Image (cartoon, rainbow, N blue to C red):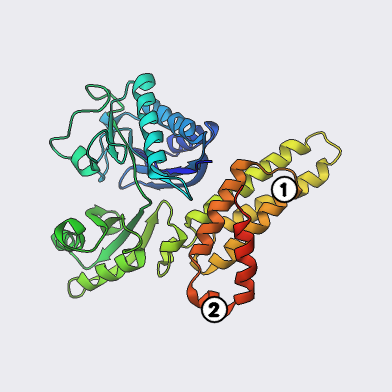
Amino acid sequence: MTLLESVPNFSEGRDPQVMERLAAAATAGGAFVLDSSADPDHNRLVLSLAGSVSLSDGVFAAVAAAAESIDLGRHSGVHPRRGAADVIPFVPLGSSTLEEAAAAARALGDRIWDELHVPVHFYGAASPSAPRTLAEIRSGNPPPFDLGGASHPTAGSVAVGARPPLVAYNLVLNGVEIEEARRLAASLRESAGGVPGILALVFRVSAGIQLSMNLTRLGETPPGRAFEEAWKRLPPGATIASEEVVGLCPASAAAGCPGADGRLLESRLSAAAARAAARACRDRGTGSAGSEEMARLASRLEEEGESLAGLGFDDVLAGAERCAALRLVLRAGRVSSDGLELLLAVAGRGFAEAISSGVRKSFPERMAALDERIAALDP
């Protein structure tokens, strides 16, 4: 089975009712909602969604709700945007491929134009010919739409793409002027000879001057390194007041980044599996002879989901073990499914790959047992 993540960015970060409507639409459409990150300064909502065959239906439902609820003509915010549903990337998870993500992106783009009449740019691996970037689409001279003509009168247009995992990482700077911050951002950008995999912009927000980065080559520049590189380039007297991960961060990239604690991709995948299993327990237990036992199991699974969602980098070994144990619990409770086992397999493997060599050497017997359980996770 294919497991993909989609991280749609919507042009609404201030109205709670609209934001709840978008997340609810994605859930009703069949997607697992892993995270919801809103920013009123940017006036932007980032949903982190996952799923297999039903993911695209959930993303489309959220896009349709955005087209109905958001009038781009009334929108204001510091972040650049062209649409109510502004950017929709698809990201392969586990053993899924970028080609599978690109196919899902192109199919969604077709549906958005056919059913909603919102024009579409494709970008990244979903581009129809040479890969196109978001910067090109947002430029003053954007390319023609791949689907459709003039922008929708209220919903604008949408950029739908496919890409490898990235981390959106923000730092709030103290003691700098906006032009100093822009020079710092320019020195970080890979395109200007800076740090591999860093895209950087600067915004003035309510908390101060924000350095907003997309980290696109996590193997070379995870958030911890991005922090260090920004710190080295600060002008005299300047400091970093805070850090923020927007959306989720793979566990393998989370070392040295306190802002990633509680925002690990793997923790949210495993939490989604636990919560979905809890709902299945309640559904199966209604009116049955074992309804009381199923209700107790549902409560335990809900508690486990809440706990898993908050794991940090220091918990990756325990997270991998808990994914393997949760698989057995779901099977014993007869609420397992291929989809839930796929979530746990990807999460468990991601946790295991993030375990440091030092931890592996310190717990050889524990690691040997874990490796056997992780190998058995594949549905």
- Dot 2 alpha-carbon crowd within 10 angstroms: few under 14, some 14 to 19, many 20 or more: few
Q: Residue at x 25, y 61 (%)?
A: 196
> Residue 287 placed where, x, y %?
82, 33
Residue 300 in view, yes or no = no
User: Which callout, 1 or 2, points at the residue further toward the start of the chain?
Assistant: 1
Residue at left 48%, top 49%?
Answer: 95
* Rendering coords of residue 285 (x, y %): 78, 38
Write down the quadrant of residue 238 in the picture: bottom left
- Residue 62 falls left or right of residue 372: left
Query: Which mark identifies residue 331?
Result: 1
Q: Amino acid at mark 2?
A: Lys
Residue indicated by mark 2: 361
**Corner quadrant of residue 325:** bottom right
Residue name at image x 17 percent, y 34 percent: 142
Mark whose residue sits in front, 1 or 2: 2
Which quarter of the rendering shows the N terminus?
top right
Residue 264 place in picture, x, y as percent: 48, 57
Q: Is residue 28 left or right of residue 126?
A: right
